[in-house]
Image (tube, grey):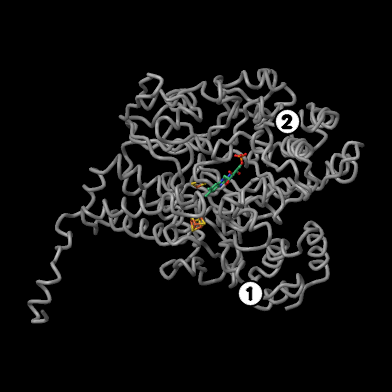
Amino acid sequence: MSTTIPYKPGKEPHAREHRLIFRNVDRADYDPSIDCYIRNGGYVQLKKALGMERQAIIDEVKKSGLRGRGGAGFPTGVKWGFIPPTNTKPVYLICNADESEPGTFKDRYIMHQDPHQLVEGMIISCFAVKAQLAYIYIREEFPEAAIILEKALAEARAKGYLGKNVGGTAYDLEIYVHRGAGAYICGEETGLIESLEGKRPYPRIKPPYFPAALGLYMSPTIVNNVESLCHVKHILEMGSEAYAKLGTPNNTGTRILCVSGDVQKPGYFEVQVGHVTMGEVINDLCGGLKPGRKLKAIIPGGSSAKVLRADEKFKLKDGRELGIMDIPMDFDTMAACGTMAGSGGVIIMDDSRSMSWVINNLNQFYAHESCGQCTPCREGSLWMKKISDRIVAGTASPSDVDELLRVANNIEGKTICAFGEACSWPTQSFVKKFRDEMIGDTKPELESKIVNPETVLAAANLV
Amino acid sequence: MQIPTELETKMDEVITHYPVSKRSAVLPLLHLIQHHFRFISDEAVNWVAAKLGLEPIQVLEVVTFYPGFRQTAPGKFHIRVCRTLSCAMAGGYELMESLCKAGNIDRSHVDHHHPIAISTDGKYSIEFAECLASCGFGPVCMVEDDFHESVKPESAAELLQKYL
Ligand SMILES: Cc1cc2nc3c(=O)[nH]c(=O)nc-3n(C[C@H](O)[C@H](O)[C@H](O)COP(=O)(O)O)c2cc1C
Ligand code: SF4
Ligand code: FES
């Protein structure tokens, strides 16, 4: 199918790609208008969905095995099923278009180049969960995408796919674009909801504030990533069974990998989940490492995922023994290797990189982005930055490296939201896997002498 | 501070996007204000609060939290340079340095609470931003609402030439 589509020169998909969501990205003959979308078969699935039982759509999404593409990989259909069956309050749906996890750059292209795919996926999803009001929460740094989406929504409204009597049925739906204001924590779903309520984006504690039960305006709310919502359309188009044949069991479908860092050709690649290995990503999709360089480390799923060291070996429970290049790009194997597939953002680092410098850069990100509600995260993220500042500046002592780890260990699991894990996992993994190198960046002579207070006091004749 | 009629009409339309709670319109109203006046003054905070039936502190706490809102005027062209890992590996810090040189901007006094530096002639202002979601094509920066990727530090002056 993809062979018949003309792509822009130099932007052709790689032979290993399997494009569903990105089918129209970088096409030479495509534009974001609704006419172009409809010419290419758009809004057919919406018409089909409007004729289906709501539960049948949810069941299709469940059977497809679709797992959220925003970071946690939670099954989308199962999430939709969490709306309490006895619910009498209005239901809301929010598309998470905050795309702010470092290393992730995929939702941007969907919104810029194929906005109606997202709009159709959203309308189908809203219909399935009975939402009549929905928002696209888009980060402020995507001003152009916000305009494109608003235009797309207006076009859909003009065609009767939004507003009163969607597609001529009794179903009414409004979708609006809501812009953030430059804070990473607005990507966390409960922080996002607070932000959409016009407040500081302080995440809410779960339980009880699981959005599907107590979300926007304390009503059931479904929050899904841009890419996840687009998949819904393709699940209806292909049927859940055919969709689930893509990828591998429990890791179905396609997903977009975003590769950055030290490779020849960084970029985005839509592949079947689990069908390519890390080595194939680097060597086939991205044209290999830079000349003369050796692989040093990989962050496989956005900056919050634990780093992998080039020479690591993983012994899995099912008996497989994998080197870093053998890891298939799926949710479950990544988790079994002690990290996560996360948001699909793969950051490659070669032997020219200092690991102290890398973790310091990330620590600065997390120190800047902590919302400040929980003491371990607010203080800890700043201390991690300060200690790694010292290591990079050459003014740290060897024990500072362990102090850095201690601070990280005191954040994980002790906070309101998963930012606590997101900010401590990088430090924990870098210190664990590159301890010697980091200690090499410190100076033993700077070690503060441990002084027994009694000696000091005795010397001053105070005891 | 004078809110032009067209701006207020736009605001009134935006408020209808939030039928459940007018408070939800705080961010969009602040965006409209910042877009028009270039920054958000105390007067504007009070005005938005009155418009939405809120206490001024409920608006001010939003302004002070989000890095995207400014309480002082930036330069004629505001620049944001991505600082985060993939861009930093591709030369983001070098890009910042050469933009400052090309635009005559002194960043020596910036800190967490005052992240923006302005050129002496007021034409450019600059700050670091965190990951702008184009990590494969770094270093990236934004000038006003325009997005620029793979900006070589050497071409900083050339980039600024587009904004005069
Ligand atoms: C600190 C933090 C930042 C997050 N940022 C994003 C983001 O930028 N985009 C996103 O889709 N999900 C993000 N998430 C995940 C969301 O909380 C939520 O799980 C996701 O939007 C659900 O969508 P999905 O099930 O379709 O993946 C973030 C989570 C955390 C803890
Ligand atoms: S863990 Fe950090 S980001 Fe999350 S609520 Fe607590 S302080 Fe805020
Ligand atoms: S790190 Fe600069 S765009 Fe992501």
* Label 1: element kind: helix
| Picture layout, residue A197 above or below residue B33 | above
| Picture layout, residue B47 above or below residue A196 | below
Residue B57: mark: 1
The residue at label 1 has a CB less than 8 Å from ligand 2: no
Residue at 79% across, 62% down: B15
Residue A453, image x, y percentages: 15, 71
User: Where ligand 1 lies, by quadrant?
Assistant: top right
* Label 2: element kind: helix
Looking at the image, which is closer to me, A41 or B151? A41
Q: Amino acid at mark 1?
A: Ile
Residue at 37% across, 27% down: A324
Protein chain holding label 2: A
Q: Amino acid at mark 2?
A: Lys
Q: Would you name the residue on which mark 2 appears? A: A233
Residue A409, image x, y percentages: 35, 50
Cα distance in 3D space between marks 2 and 1: 43 Å
Protein chain holding label 1: B
